[in-house]
Image (tube, rainbow, N blue to C red):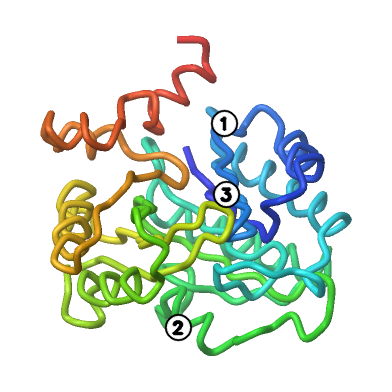
């Protein structure tokens, strides 16, 4: 089974997001919407081997006919309307299956929809990371409606936001710098600081790309520690998408109570619900 965690540059128009969700069909496990990021994350998977691939293509077609990046504004970096499309091997699949799916999707979206595709992660022969693709591509929209897309194959990761109680983006950026790997922080942690205008708060947004090195609990406690050192509390945490069940089982009861996370937020629980279990 493959999972596809597709990131689209639309987080404000409810009717458009609902249209894109319907296009994904029964393989849709979760939709996370953020108006400040102006972004929606669609988690796709299904019992058949190609369910995620078919759903990703259907959703991309719908997005191409609906989105216009030329008028897009949001705090999250992006290179296109159908912005990031990673494939992940779940139970019964191998990493090579995710690589194949990513490369086939990249070829398809360029041929079918005319969107330039840039490979990253295990799908890229050069092994470039998503931040490296973004840095190389820059603002690929160039005034066009769809821009480009980053297509990858990767292991399971956790995306999590820590909202701060204070509307101080400089604190969020300082905390992000303290916890992320590239600046000497925790291994496998990518982090950015944003201001959320609609909530009048700042946010530390993290991707935990190596859960064996740094798990969800350790990363969030680190953000709280670094925030408190700067006189700011963490107001709450928010998953972007779903979390593997094995990751939650590693978390302490104290963290689960503080974070308000439970099994309903896991990939496995959504798949079980999809199958009527």
- In the image, what residue occupies the spot 38% across and 49% down? 94
**Residue 43 falls left or right of residue 35:** left
Please, what secondary structure does the residue beneath circle 3 have?
Answer: strand
Mark 2 or mark 3, earlier in chain = 3
Please give the label number shown on residue 48: 1
- Distance, label 2 to label 3, CA atoms, is 21 Å
Name, please, the residue furthest toward the right. Answer: 65
Residue where numbered disc 3 is placed: 41
Q: Nearer the viewer, mark 2 or mark 1?
A: 2
**Residue 41 falls left or right of residue 210:** right
Which of 3 and 165 lies nearest the eye of the viewer?
165
Q: Position of residue 239 (x, y in %)?
A: 40, 44
Please, what secondary structure does the residue beneath circle 2 have?
Answer: helix
Please give the label number shown on residue 15: none
Name, please, the residue furthest toward the top. Answer: 277
- In the image, what residue occupies the spot 35% across and 40% down? 243
State how many labels appear. Answer: 3
Q: Choose top left, top right, bottom left or bottom right for residue 222.
A: bottom left
Q: Choose top left, top right, bottom left or bottom right for residue 197.
A: bottom right
- In the image, what residue occupies the spot 76% across and 71% down? 110
Residue where numbered disc 2 is placed: 132
- Distance, label 3 to label 1, CA atoms, is 21 Å
**Residue 274 falls left or right of residue 171:** right
Sort mark 3 into few (<14), some (14-19) or many (20+) by Cα contacts within 10 Å: many
Height in image: 23 above or below 229?
above
């Amino acid at each position: 089974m493959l999972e596809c965690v597709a990131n689209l540059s639309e987080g404000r128009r409810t009717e458009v997001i609902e249209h894109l969700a319907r296009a994904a069909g029964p393989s849709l496990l979760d939709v996370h919407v953020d108006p400040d990021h102006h972004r929606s994350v669609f988690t796709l998977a299904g019992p058949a081997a190609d369910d995620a691939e078919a759903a990703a293509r259907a959703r991309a077609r719908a997005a191409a006919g609906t989105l216009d990046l030329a008028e897009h504004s949001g705090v999250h970096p992006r290179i296109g309307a159908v912005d990031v499309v990673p494939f992940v091997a779940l139970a019964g699949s191998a990493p090579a299956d995710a690589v194949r799916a990513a490369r086939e999707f990249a070829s398809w979206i360029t041929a079918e929809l005319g969107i330039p595709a840039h490979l990253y992660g295990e799908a890229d022969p050069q092994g470039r990371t998503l931040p490296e693709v973004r840095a190389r591509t820059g603002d690929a929209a160039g005034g066009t409606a769809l821009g480009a897309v980053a297509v990858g194959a990767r292991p399971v990761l956790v995306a999590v936001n820590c909202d701060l109680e204070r509307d101080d983006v400089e604190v969020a950026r300082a905390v992000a710098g303290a916890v992320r790997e590239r600046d000497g922080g925790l291994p496998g942690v990518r982090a950015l600081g944003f201001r959320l205008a609609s909530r009048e708060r700042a946010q530390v947004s993290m991707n935990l790309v190596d859960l064996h090195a740094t798990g969800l609990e350790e990363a969030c406690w680190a953000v709280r520690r670094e925030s408190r050192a700067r006189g700011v509390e963490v107001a709450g945490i928010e998953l972007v998408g779903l979390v593997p069940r094995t990751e939650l089982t590693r978390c302490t009861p104290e963290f689960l109570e503080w974070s308000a996370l439970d099994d309903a937020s896991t990939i496995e629980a959504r798949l079980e619900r999809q199958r009527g279990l």
